[in-house]
Image: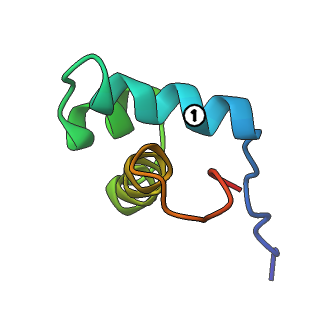
Amino acid sequence: MTATTRRTFSSEFKLEAAQFVVDKGYVVREAAEAIGVGKSTMDKWVKQLRKERNGEAIKLIR
């Protein structure tokens, strides 16, 4: 049986991906497909960015 490895993304990549949705008006599903991540992953990154911009104390897209 082959073990699958989990992909990792840099904080900069996550931030730029989320900015496509928040700042440029892309649809989450389309942005996720374009960069090759799942919709739920993109949803999480966008949610984190919006919280950060609203001043909530979280670690930005880690």
Which sits in the foreground, 31 or 5? 31
Give the residue furthest to the top: 24
Q: Which residue is at 82% across, 75% downward?
A: 3
Q: Which residue is at 33% across, 54% downward?
A: 39
From what the image shows, is residue 48 above or below residue 16?
A: below
Q: Position of residue 55 (x, y in %)?
A: 48, 53
Q: Position of residue 45 (x, y in %)?
A: 48, 51
Q: Is 2 left or right of 7, judged from the image as shown?
A: right
Give the residue furthest to the front: 55
Q: Position of residue 31 (x, y in %)?
A: 32, 31
Q: Position of residue 56 (x, y in %)?
A: 49, 62
Q: How is the image coloured?
A: rainbow
From what the image shows, is residue 45 above or below residue 28?
A: below
Q: Which residue is at 36% across, 62% downward?
A: 40
Which sits in the foreground, 31 or 3? 31
Quadrant of the frame with the N terminus: bottom right
Q: Amino acid at mark 1?
A: Leu
Quadrant of the frame with the C terminus: bottom right
Q: Quadrant location of residue 11?
A: top right
Q: Which residue is mark 1?
A: 15
- Classed neighbour count for the residue bearing mark 1: other residues with Cα under 10 Å, few (<14), some (14–19), many (≥20): some
Which sits in the foreground, 61 or 43? 61
